[in-house]
Image: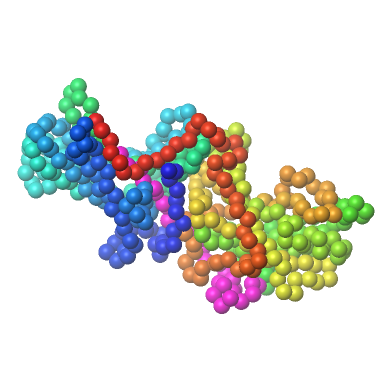
Amino acid sequence: MDSELPGYSEAPSSTTAGSSSNDTQTRSEHSISLQDSKGFKWLALTVSSRAPASASLPIFYEGDVVSGQVDLDVLKSESIRGISIKITAGTTLVGQEEQPFLNVETDLWTPSIPLPDGSKLTKFTKGKYTWPFSFTLPPEVEVQDQKAKKMFSLPTSFSERASTAYLDYKLIVTVKRGLLKVNNTLVTTFAYVPVTRPEPSSAMLQKAYKENLPLVGPEGDPDGWHILPPSTIQGKLFDSRTVEATLSLALAKPLTYGRGTIIPLWLTLIGDDEQALDLLSTPKAIKLLLVRSLATNDTEHRTDNCFFENVARAVLWAPEDYRGQGQRILQGEVEVKGILKPSTLFPRFTISYKLDLHPFEVAGFAATAPKNSPLLSQKVTIANFPALGIPIRSRAPPEYVQEQGGDYNKSFGLLENGNQRFYHHGGTVGF
């Protein structure tokens, strides 16, 4: 199945996740092996991770220690030149070679390195041998970015069915043989999760969510909202008269939102035509979409390698006392689904998000603006974890159902068939 980042319910309380003695996160143990032609497991790799189950792909957060052991079971004496383990990572575009950006390797055994018990040997005799290992992934790597090398934070793992790009992390054990003999490798892919989270919301917004109070809008809480430039809505009402209204849209600050939370919205319409305001303030008339962009080159401005997909639609509703002479107010939210990939900036691989407000769609009103051109657009950042403090949860009335968005098998511009890739974890590999 595809490698997905799950919607985590627990997260580290600081920027770095590192494992420690007081880390109470449930951990799973994963084991994979190599077998000979008779089914005998002669090489095994065992690693502990944050995954919810042993059968899942191993998962590591930023700052975690990647640790485990390698077991070698020798049935008869044989010559081995060395045993090593490494972590690699790279980006792959369909039809191109992988571009590696991480390679951390250590020798578990060579003829000059003693066994864990202190003894030395030049040839393995019948018996079982075990080597523990431990890696701490670097927080940053140096990568060629167009014409210069720059430091980048380690990016998130990425694999989606029919995607044109993949970003893999692998743990590889290599048994090195002598001349004219083929080395043996044991490989497992794992998911890497950067620890990113927003700064806390304003004090007034946190108080409203903590005590279940009505939200205070941009006028009463200017520190809590980012107000977009106003937009003018023009069109014909019932094909009889031209009407005009001014739209103001505000998003809760900061413009970074954790997966599994929501984006609070505040929308205001001002105009002279009361009938037009009533129609335009119908919640279903407002098409506000969260759009994901996946760029697989060094710039987002080349449309041939930039793919867009609608991943959520806003839900809006009228609060109490929302009507006023010449004014209508709507509150709303956009669900940031837990399965979304976080915003990522990396050479040849960028994930970004924006909110697009499209022309209103309501019976009896014909907008003069082009249907495919957004009235307003605002870039936002999606983080892996929610902000510390008061959780920002959905407040949508029960009768409002969040519209589903995001079919990663049918992303605009992505390949439907022929380039699908599937990950395996566990199982056996013969040699």
Percent coordinates x, y for residue 249 in the rendering = 70, 60
Q: Position of residue 371 (x, y in %)?
A: 76, 45
- Kindly give the residue lying farthest to the front in the view shown: 38
**326 in relation to 29, above or below:** below
Q: Quadrant where the C terminus lies?
A: top left
**Residue at horizontal 86%, vertical 65%?**
274
Q: Is residue 254 visible?
A: no
**Residue at point 88% right, 52% down?**
236
Looking at the image, is 296 positioned above or below residue 218?
Answer: above
> What colouring does the structure picture have?
rainbow
In the drawing, does residue 140 fall left or right of residue 300?
left
Residue pictured at 72% horizontal, 50% vertical: 358
Indicate the quadrant containing the N terminus: top left, top right, bottom left or bottom right.
top left
Q: Nearer the viewer, residue 116 or 74?
A: 74
34, 175: nearer the viewer = 34
Residue 192 is covered by the magenta coloring: yes
Task: Measuring from the top left, give residue 129's x and y in whole percent.
Answer: 13, 44
- The answer, for residue 276, to whether it is visible in the render is yes
Tell me which segment is drawn in magenta: 187-216
Most foreground residue, 142 or 264: 264
